Amino acid sequence: RGEFIRTPENLVLHKVLLDGAKASKPMPTLREAVDMFIRIEGRESDDIRTNARWRKEAFKAAEHLAEVLPEGWETPVDKITREDAQRWRDICAIGKCWSPDTAGKYRKLINAMFKGVYTSLEIDRRSPFDGLKIRLPKRISSEARVPYTDEDLATLDKAMAAMDPQERLVAAVCRATGCRPVEVCHLEPEDIQLDAEIPHIIIRPNRKNEGV
């Protein structure tokens, strides 16, 4: 029999053996949590691009959260608090002047990630993003917006050259019409009027963009 050495680690182990206490499970880090979330909630779709875009958005949502955490990606999820969520809102959603669509999308993704991970690990804990209110400042009116300069358009054209074909088509429509990317992606075939006297597209509510 070996001699019992009174180290902090051995004292904890001794208590576990005597009291039958359960050793707590190590909490996943934010990086591990987003990987777990993507595995758990990965969208079933025949469209590989749809899956890739969703995974990219889920990762980007977590990346913005990592920016405001002292330990970044290595922060254990149980250490991420409501105060961290509020700091994310103030620094990212408000500080970076996100649109309501972008802020709502990222908050929804992060909230779903926490709920999915907690459920998977059987943790009875509320997501720090659950019910988080985001009141964005009033955006500049369209009358006050400054149009793109020739230099801006040249920069956009250069960026488009590096995009994949599908992204390039969306960017080209945005460049020509002034639409947002989400509006282009949600177009239905009947919204594209190429045979009209003046070819145009119609932006209107449909089954794809409901709630956007």
Image (spheres, grey):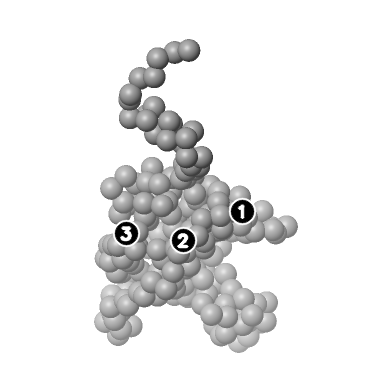
Point out the tag, 3 or 1, that comes first from the N-terminus.
Answer: 1
Q: Is residue 207 above or below residue 74?
A: below
Mark 3 lies on residue: 84
The answer for how far apart the CA atoms under marks 2 and 3 are is: 16 Å
Q: Which residue is mark 1?
A: 40
Closer to the N terminus: mark 1 or mark 2?
A: 1
Give the residue at mark 2. Answer: 125
Q: Return the x and y of residue 60 as percentages of the image width and height.
A: 45, 55
The circle drawn on residue 140 is none
Q: Nearer the viewer, residue 19 or 135?
A: 19
Q: Nearer the observer, disc 1 or disc 2?
A: 2
Residue type, label 1: Ile
Vertical side of 15 occupied by 44: above or below:
below
Q: Residues within 10 Å of mark 1 (few under 14, many from 20)?
A: few
In the image, is 12 to the left or to the right of 199? left
Crowd band around label 3 with a 10 angstrom C-alpha radius: few (<14), some (14–19), many (20+): some
Query: Residue at left 40%, top 47%?
Result: 76
For discs 2 and 3, the disc positioned in front in the rendered view: 2
